[in-house]
Amino acid sequence: MQTSTTQQFGVAVSFEDTATAFALKTDAQLYQSYLLFKALHHSWLVKVGTSSVQWALKAGLPVKKLLKATLFQQFCGGETIKECEPIIYRMAALGVGSILDYSVEGEKTETGFENTKKEIINTIYYASNHRQQVPFCVFKVTGLAPFRLLEKVSASIKGQEPLALPSELKGFEAVRERIDQICRVAAENEVRILIDGEETWIQPAIDVLAYEMMEKYNRQKAIVYNTYQMYVTDRLEKLRYWYDLAAKQGFYLGVKLVRGAYMEKERERAAQLGYPDPIQPTKEACDQDFNQALGFCIENKHRISLCAGTHNEESCYYLVSLMEKYNIKPDDSGVYFAQLYGMSDNISFNLAKAGYNVAKYLPYGPVEATLPYLFRRAQENTSVAGQSSRELLLIQRELQRRKIQPSYSQKVKFCC
């Protein structure tokens, strides 16, 4: 299958080299990843495990150490930027950058929002002093704004309900000011900043803020990037719309393409409230829109800077083939591949070895605050067909290549 895919797109890159894929990991770390992905392969275990962790934390039980040694260690860089540094430098030595992601979301107080804003700005300052290691920073608007406010603003944008209360107008202006401060610091330090995509019923407010920032700070080049979740049926249309607007108004479009992360929640809400399901009807339809969006961005590279956030090997091969077709050099700063830390290392490190720009999302933050992110990663590896299976297969191949057959005592050590 892999050979036929490389032949189909006519590219020399291959994602089968496990020695390159897992060069970052020691034998012990590799085996621990094997155990974790083997557990994530069982959806019932993930459901029981996430529920148990939530209950244990509420009950005040000491599960933080176990959580930090398993899910957190696999998918997060540390609790602080300083804790992330060893990983940042080890990945950079192999040609892979880090996207610093203060992975705290769903804050509820003004103090919490302000603290999150300050930490995001800290990531920008860090990136400005470590440009080779940290090519992007990122944030979620839900870390800076009340969810209900974003929901109401989005409904107002769609004409579903008015936004009239003075407190609501004042609250949204405070959100706009926080985001403007972040983007202004990013522009002043020439650090690219990604705005993550979120649920469709709050996305209109996020889109408005993102494009206000682009129009303001992307006059010379793309600094601010907005995210398009291509499993939403209207995103390709929206990408074309915002490209036309950027061309007319004279700013550059920063585009991060992903497939999406909230499918079950989106479908459940649509069914409960009786509106059309916003998610693509099939995986094939999502893949088609994603790849069409890649083509659109590359065809319009004079106006668009692209960060392709994907774990899909075929889409990565397709993007490589597009770059070759349009004579775009692998290290062109306007095109980046991105994957999540702890996943799809075979894509990230093999692309980097071939000279392409690659960066890993590197979340960090207090263990308890990163739980929503960690639970999404756990669920993703059960709900996305073949994801945990593919990770397991590659890890097993590398374990065999290294001739690792851990003893029982080693297994106990890794698990505890």
Image (cartoon, grey):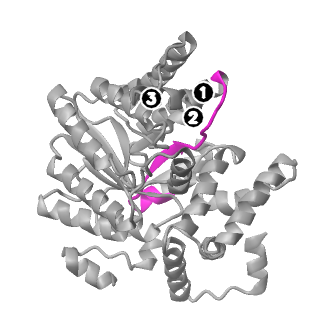
Query: Which disc is residue 379 wearing?
Result: none
Residue 160 - label: 3
Q: Position of residue 246 (x, y in %)?
A: 21, 32
Lower sequence index among marks 3 and 1: 1
- Left or right, 384 with respect to 300, comes to right
Figure label count: 3
| Amino acid beneath label 3 | Gln
Residue in the image at 12% along x and 63% along y: 325
Residue 23 drawn at (x, y percent)? 48, 71
Residue 53: in sight, yes or no?
yes
Q: CA distance from mark 3 to mark 1?
A: 27 Å
Marks 1 & 2, CB-CB < 8 Å contact? yes
Horizontal and vertical percent position of residue 147: 57, 33
Q: Specify the quadrant that holds the N terminus.
A: bottom left
What residue is disc 2 on?
143
Determine which of the numbered discs, if any, sits on residue 113 in the image.
1
Question: Would residue 130 be seen by someone viewing this image from the given angle?
Answer: no
Q: Secondary structure at mark 2?
A: helix
* Direction from residue 292 to residue 123 in the image, left or right: right
Q: Range of the magenta residues? A: 90-110
Q: What quarter of the picture does the C terminus occupy?
A: bottom right
Q: Secondary structure at mark 1?
A: helix
Q: Secondary structure at mark 3?
A: loop
Which amino acid type is shown beneath numbered disc 1?
Phe
**Mark 1 closeness class: few <14, some 14–19, many ≥20 residues within 10 Å:** many
Q: Is residue 10 left or right of residue 366?
A: left
